[in-house]
Image (spheres, helix red, strand yellow):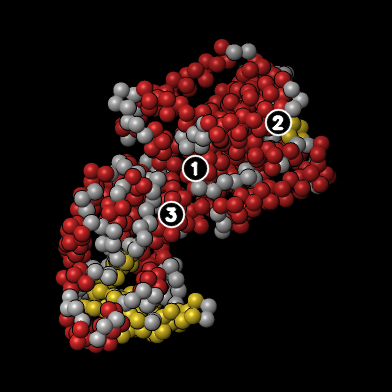
Amino acid sequence: MKNFLFTPRAAVYAGIFIVLLLLPKMINAYHLSLVETGLSLAIMALGLNLLLRYTGVLSFGIGAYFAAGAYAVGMLNMYWPEYYTFETAILASILVSAAVSALFGFVCVRHTRIFFSILTLALSMLLFAVLEKAYHITGGSDGIRIPIPTFFGHEFEGMRRFQFLTGPYYYILLGIFSASTLIMLAIVNSPFGKALQATRDNELRAEMIGVRVRRFRWYAFVIAGTFSGLSGGVWCFVSGHITPEICNWVFSGEVVYMVLLGGFMIFEGPIVGAMLFTYLRLYAVAATEYWMLIIGATLVILVLLLPGGVTGGLYDLIERFKPKGRAKAGAEVKHA
Amino acid sequence: MLEVKDVIKSFGKFMVIRGVSFDINQNEVVAMLGPNGAGKTTMVNLISGHLFPDEGQVLLAGKDISTSPPYQRIKAGIARNFQLTQLFEELSVLDNVRNCLFSVQGKLGRFFKPAAAYKEATEQALEILEVFNLAQFKDELGEGLSEGDKKILDTAMAFALKPDFLLLDEPTSGVATAEKFKVMDTIINAIQARGTATMIIEHDMDIVSDYAQRVMVLAEGEILADGVPVEVMESEAVQETLFGVKSDDAVRC
């Protein structure tokens, strides 16, 4: 295991983790809450990229499992407030999103390419319709308020939402984000992760070396769904209020955008993408009411000039300045 | 070892395999010949589980596997290569082979420890790459190999599944002529060390006559001849089917 712990990448990870730990002392509360949004969305982006990069299928309905996670928290508070704590809420978001993604995934993994994408989109819109129309159960388009929970018996009574978010909650979230990242890193490098990549590269061959292709794709779907659910579970506390919009395909599309922006070829790309997107949208919205235009234009520029996303471009740059200069930057990117 | 009994397979109205029966014993190297469209690859697909027969049975060591999915057949000991190379192009050469070993060891579902930390599988994969002369490319991506090396890797992957019955669909097509016999020697030596039964689909007569102990000729979905290479090649019907000539003016191979 030593080889995996003492690498330049591990050093960068540790450095970034320390910066993130010290962040509350470095930036103001407003920006810290934005970082929190970015960190929670990053968990979902990692999940989406397990499908896109490592399984080779593009989900346009990842928001459904995010919503499943967030609504699990909201409805736990609505119907069983006596059990409403942070730990039960997170457990509920994981279980519910795993169940929903297992069900939806069972249908979706029978297909690949555009058929898969359309099915994921259709199923997420089905859930969207239910969340919006079942007013008396889900609060309809009014949504559900998410109050501050207790954390392992510790109460944050009297604390304002803002204080809670920029104080203790930041560290809780950072812990969950770090754990999720490490778990995903382990998954993509494990024999299971390699088998997934095998199904992506060549379904026929994967089948003929004994990979149960659909089943493995289904597992990947459930893992991705659960990551999204966890993401929804931690994000809803940051937002304080959830509406069916998070189940809409527009939101799912934004997650795809995040992954492309950060660079889907590199493991860390989606994390960078989620962070950048959070800020990009903020400044775009502040700058003009036609903010979608800015987002769209960036996407076009990205696809044309920087197909590897921000991290892909960065890796290419590093490769270019490496002394030995192994020329094929693209090949290097694919190893990551 | 492997037994095929009265197998019939149709695609729509077109019957590709018309009641084929044969068996292959342990340690035996059998070549299957036949003109294009005779149903050779369909036969490989029926045995490997990519297709299921409409009628008849495929038995491995006495067990009916006619309707078993591929992963069960691999567990039972059948492996195949592909005529048109099928690799995991964006994985390293080492990973291509190591994935096969994880499959044999039942470790494909392990999702925590990095693949590279499985010492046994990694060492075995390196040994196989060494045997097939691919060790220097272990960190290259599959897509980075030359066509000939891709073909060899394709066969190495089938071999890494440690089969009792190995199906080789034109293992040397696309391999440089100078390398062909080296590759075949490697494969056959490795096979014989394990006592693996093998069926080779091959167009190259030199390879057939050098390596196969038995030849089957498939034509229009039926077995036309089955026997020792020399005898089968002498048969008039076979020469007509394979070379389109009668025995008088046949070019001896």
Tell me residue A290's x, y (percent): 74, 27
Image check: B232 left or right of B82? left
Rendered position, A219 above or below B210: above
Specify the subunit that label 1 lies on: A
* Residue on which the image places disc 1: A53
* Residue on which the image places disc 3: A202
Nearer-the-camera pick, A174 or B221 = B221
Give the distance between the C-alpha atoms of the residues marked 2 and 1, in whole angstroms.
26 Å
Q: Amino acid at mark 3?
A: Asn
In the rendered image, the quadrant that contains the N terminus of chain B is bottom left
Tell me residue B99's x, y (percent): 35, 51
Residue A244 makes an appearance in the image? yes
Of the two numbered discs 2 and 3 in the rendering, the one whose residue sits closer to the viewer? 2
Q: Are marks 3 and 1 in contact (CB under 8 Å)?
A: no
* Residue on which the image places disc 2: A292
Do dots 2 and 3 share one subunit? yes
Do dots 2 and 1 share one subunit? yes
